[in-house]
Image (spheres, grey):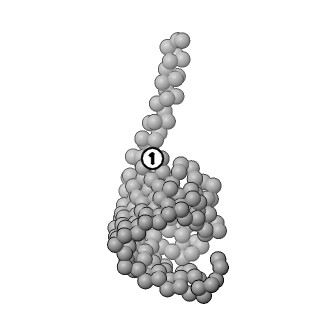
Amino acid sequence: MGKKAAKAIVYMAVTPVMLIWAFSIFMNIPPVQDLIITKINESLGDESGLEFHARNIRYSFPCKIELTGFTLTKDEKVIASGKKASADLPLFSLLTGKADLNSILLENAYINTSGMFRSADVDGTIGYARLNSDEIDFEKELMAMKSMEIACCDLHIEQKLPVDTIF
């Protein structure tokens, strides 16, 4: 094997690693994080009127997203806020419109969903929550949940539908 072929193989092996490394550095630049938050606000606001703010967004390969100091509002009413939220998604799952969500983690969060869902209102604080899901369909707004862990919570849940209602 010649020197040119060996160089080509080395370049093919190193290039993806360098791209991932450059992407991870690029995602931690504050103007890029501001752009991401702006894009999230545009996509949330167009359909639902939600507004999102985060002090810091951290992305790590393959697809772990961590938010610190986040707030989600609708018509100036706080729906959710917290110290930390993170999501672990398989690579490229968001491109299909459906996502297999490995986990969502909330720490020191406040939730108030009054008037948002037809079946129940949830209001209170969550010290720690971890959700594991099989699939989220963003178009249909559906999520199939495998398991949920909650600790240090003070939640008020008000069911709006009759107990015998089948979903």
Q: Is residue 140 left or right of residue 43?
A: right
**Image point (42%, 41%), residue name:** 21
The answer to which of 48 and 114 lies nearer the viewer is 114
Q: Nearer the viewer, residue 156 or 96?
A: 156
Residue nearer the viewer, 98 or 8: 98
- The quarter of the image holding the N terminus is top right
**Residue depicted at x 49% and y 36%:** 16
| Residue 71 picture location, percent across and down | 41, 72
| Res 77 quadrant in image | bottom left
Residue 9 shows in the view: yes
Residue 159: percent from left, percent from top: 53, 85
- Disc 1: CA contacts within 10 A as few (<14), some (14-19) or many (>=20): few
Q: Quadrant of the C terminus?
A: bottom right
| Residue beneath the point at 52% across and 23% down | 9
Nearest the viewer among 139 and 90 is 90
Q: For this view, does 153 lie left or right of residue 141? A: left
In the orientation shown, which residue stands out farthest toward the front?
Answer: 164
The residue carrying mark 1 is: 61
Q: Is residue 3 left or right of residue 162?
A: left
Identify which residue is drawn at 60% across, 54% down: 95
Q: Secondary structure at mark 1?
A: loop
